[in-house]
Amino acid sequence: STLAKVQPLLCKNHGVANGILDSKPHFHEPGLDPDQEALVTSYTKTLEKVEEMEQELSRVNKENEWLQIKLEASRAAGLESVKNASCVLQEEYNQRCDDLEKRHEGVMRTMKARKLEQEEMLKRSTENLSRMNVALKEKYSQIEELEKRVQRMEEEKKTLKEKQRLLKGKLQQMMSQAEDTNSCVKVQTEISTLQEQISHLDHVIHTQHQNLHALIHQTEGLNNELRLQDERIESLKEKIGMLQAKNEELKYRVQFWSAQSKSKVSKGVSVKLDGTTPYTMATRLRK
């Protein structure tokens, strides 16, 4: 057949060494008919296309290897960036925890100072309340004593008026009977003396009533003051309780954030590419 005739020529024209076909074309042998010559030409072109495709495939493989290296390098750089960002975030978190702990400690000191101040105010108010209770008891005793004194004076005044009334009746009787003038003068003098005593008692009773009203007014003022002191003491107790609760809450927060800050561990990111780096791979590839 034509293929059987052409095959030795192809091997001769292109050379076969150790079973490997030489891709370089040779000059055509003389004496070939047109069909054989066309077949040789077609085969030569096919070999040239195969060689071009092999070269293109080799170039594409090298380009793929280079792109793979660039991808691994980018991945390593990204992981390193994530590691650095993680370290920065951890440092920021620790700083915020420290700032928060310091702020809470400052607030705790302020709350403690306010609590001590409120407790001192409560102590003073309690002592003042005790003094006011003593003063109020004294005022009540004074009022009671003054009322008794006024009552005795009223009874004495009543007795003097009754005595004066009897003397006036006696004097009228003596004058109607035309008794001795000296006796009448003596009775008249007794009546005048009684009137002076009654007037003096009226003045003293009036003064004592004024003192009594003043004491009652002071007692009412002390009662009002005592009520206000009671309300103030209750308010101070509530404030101290609230400050104590707030102080305990802040203490718990400080302990919580302190524990969180100590237990937080930064996790690093490591990259391992088969014992070598993308840059050494690129160096080897370029060589």
Image (tube, helix red, strand yellow):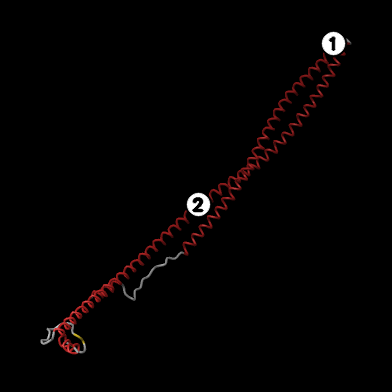
Residue 280 shows up from this direction: no
Q: Earlier in the sequence, mark 2 or mark 1?
A: 2
Q: Quadrant of residue 81?
A: bottom left
Q: Which residue is mark 1?
A: 181
Q: From what the image shows, is residue 35 above or below residue 86? A: below
Q: What label does residue 4 carry, if any?
A: none
- Assess disc 2: are there few (<14), some (14-19) or many (≥20) residues with their C-alpha within 10 Å of its C-alpha: some
Q: Which residue is mark 2?
A: 107
* In this picture, residue 259 sits left or right of residue 234: left
Task: Name the one closer to the observer, 274 or 24.
Answer: 24
Q: What amino acid type should be assigned to the residue bearing mark 1?
A: Thr
Amino acid carrying label 2: it is: Val
- Which quadrant would residue 54 be assigned to in this image? bottom left
Residue that appears at 13% across and 86% down: 33
- Which of 10 and 206 lies nearest the eye of the viewer? 10
Q: Position of residue 257 (x, y in %)?
A: 49, 59
x, y percent for residue 180:
87, 11
